[in-house]
Amino acid sequence: MTVSPARPRDEGAIADTAADSLCKRSARPWVLAATILASSMVFIDGTVVNVALPALQRAFGASASDAQWVIESYTLFLAALLLVGGSAGDRFGRRRVFALGTALFAVASIWCGVTGSVMQLIAARAVQGIGGALLVPGSLALISASFPANERGKAIGTWSGYTAITTAIGPVVGGFLIEHVSWRLAFLINVPLALLVIVLTFRYVPESRDQRASGSLDWSGAALASIGLGCLVYGLIESSNKGWGEVTVLATLVLAVLMLTLFIGLELRHPTPMLPLGLFRSRNFSGANLLTLLLYAALGGSLYFLPLNLILVQEYSAFAAGASLLPFVLPMFLLSRWSGGLVDRYGAKKPLVIGPTIAAIGFAWFAIPGVGGSYWTNYFPAVLILGFGMSISIAPLTTTVMNAVDQSLTGAASGVNNAVSRTATLLAIAAFGIVMNLAFNVSLDRHLKTSNMAPEKLHAVEVQRAKLAAIELPEAASQSEKAFLKSAISQSYVSGFRWVMLLSACLALGSALSAWLLIAGRPSKT
C-alpha cells in the first residue's frame, strides 16, 4: 500500500496553515483516530469485497465479468479522482471535503448493503470510489495541518501502521461476517464507523486549506481520465465474453485511446493539472512509477483471483480465505523500520531490484499447487515470501518517489504514485481476466471432450462458462457425473490461476528490471 498525501501543495503552505490552525494537544489523538478510521474503511473495502465475491455470485447469479465490475467500478473512480480530490480539499477546506467523502462513502455503503441486483451493486461501488477519492487524500493533509512539524512524522507513521493492521484484519472480520451472518453486513459495518468519523471530525479537527491555492480545479482532466479508463476496462472485460471483433468492444477501446490522448494533451496545457507531467522529467521519478505500475499490477491482479481460488476451488470458508493473507502483512509490519533505512544504507536501486525479485518468487510459488492439499505447504510459503518481497520494496519505493522531486512537490509526487498503483490494479484485473477466461475455456474444452455425458447435461455447463469456477452443476447429473464436472471445472480454474500467477511473476521481474535500468543507486533531487 502506498502512502497518499493530498495533491500538490507547497510544504511552506502546510506549515503556515498548521501554525494558524493547530488543534489543541489533547485533541490530536482524536484527529489521528478519525483519519485512521476513515482511511481504513477505504483500504478494507478494497480487499474485503474480494472475499465476498463468491457469495455475491451465488446471491445474484452473477458472471465472472459482473464480479470484476464490482471491484473495478470502485477502483476506477478511486484512481481517476484521487488527485483532484486532494486538490479540492486544499481549495475548499480539507475538513469539509474529508467529511463529505466520509458521508458519501457511508451512503454508498448502505446502498451496497441493501441492493437487490448486481448492477445496482456496481453503481453503488462506483459511488463508494468517489467518496474514497475525497477522503483518502484528506487524511494525511489533516494530520499535517493538525500536528506541528516535530510531531508530524510520528503521527504519519502511526497512521501508516494502524491502517496497515486494519487492512489486514478487515478481510478476516469480513470473512467471518460473510460466513456467519451475510455478505451485506460487510458493507453495512462501514456506517457506524463513518458516523463516528464524522462526529470526531467536526468535534476535534480544525478546518484548514492552502491559502496559496489558485486557478480552477482540473475537473475536465478528471472526467477525461474517468471516461478513458472506464472505456478501456470495459473493452478488456467484455472482450472475454463478446470477442475482440464485436462492435461495442472495438468502439469502447477506440474511445478509450481518444479520451486518454485528450487527457494527456489537456494536462500539458492546464495551469493547475491534476497530473503534473513535468514530474516525469526526473529519471528516478519515472523509474519509480514504472516499477509501481508493474509491481502493483502483479499484486492487485493476483490478489483478486486468490480468494476466488481458495473459496470456489479449494473450498476454504470465507473466514479462512480472509485469514490466509495475514502472513502477507506480518513481514511488512515487523520489518517496516528496518526497510525504511535500506535507502540510506544501500541506495535505492538495490532494494528495489531485490524486493520485487523476491516477490516474483512468491508469485511463481502460487502457480505450483493444484486442487486440494494443505494451506501450510501450498499457500503459506508463497504468501510469506510475497510479503517479505513487498516489505523490502514499499518503503524504499516511497522514499525514492519523495526524493526524486523538490520538497515543495512531494505531496504531488506521492499522490501521483498512489494513483498509479490504483490504476495498475484497475487495469490488471481486467487484463488478467482475459488470461483467466482463455486458459479456463481451453482446459474445460479438453476435459469435456473426454466425457460421455448426455449433450443436454454438457450444455447446462457450457452456457455457464462466464461464471468460471462458480458454475452450478446440472441437477439431472448423477453423482459420478457431478464429481467429474466439479473436477473438470476446478482443474480448469487452477489452469487459469497458474497463468495469472506466472504473469504476475513476470511483471514483478519487469519492475525489478525497471529499477535496475532507471533508478540511480542513491536518491537524487532534481
Image (cartoon, rainbow, N blue to C red):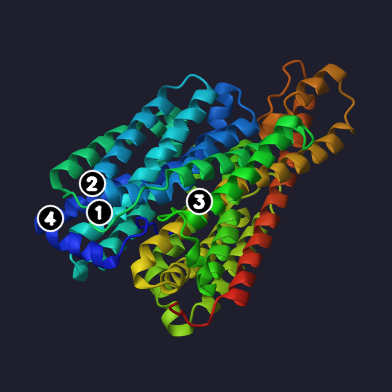
- What is the x, y in percent for residue 463? 76, 23
Question: Quadrant location of the C terminus?
Answer: bottom left
Label 3 or label 1, whichever comes before in sequence order: 1
CA separation in Å, label 1 and label 4: 11 Å
Judging by the rendered image, the residue that carries numbered circle 2 is 95
CA separation in Å, label 3 and label 2: 24 Å
Q: Which of 104 and 475 is in front in this view?
A: 104
- What is the x, y in percent for residue 401? 45, 68
Mark 3–mark 2 CB contact (< 8 Å): no
Amino acid beneath label 3: Arg
- As helix, strand or loop, the secondary structure at mark 3 comes to helix
CA separation in Å, label 2 and label 4: 13 Å
Q: Nearer the viewer, mark 3 or mark 2?
A: 2
Mark 1–mark 2 CB contact (< 8 Å): yes
Residue 417 relative to residue 316: left or right: left
Question: Quadrant location of the N terminus?
Answer: bottom left
Residue 262 relative to residue 443: left or right: left
Q: Which of marks 2 and 4 is in front?
A: 2
Label 1 or label 2, whichever comes before in sequence order: 2
Q: Quadrant of residue 25?
A: bottom left
- As helix, strand or loop, the secondary structure at mark 1 comes to helix
Amino acid beneath label 4: Cys
Q: Which residue is drawn at 23% across and 46% down?
A: 95
Label 2 or label 4, whichever comes before in sequence order: 4
Neighbourhood count class around disc 3 (C-alpha, 10 Å): few under 14, some 14–19, many 20 upward: many
Judging by the rendered image, the residue that carries numbered circle 4 is 23
Residue 422's tag is: 3
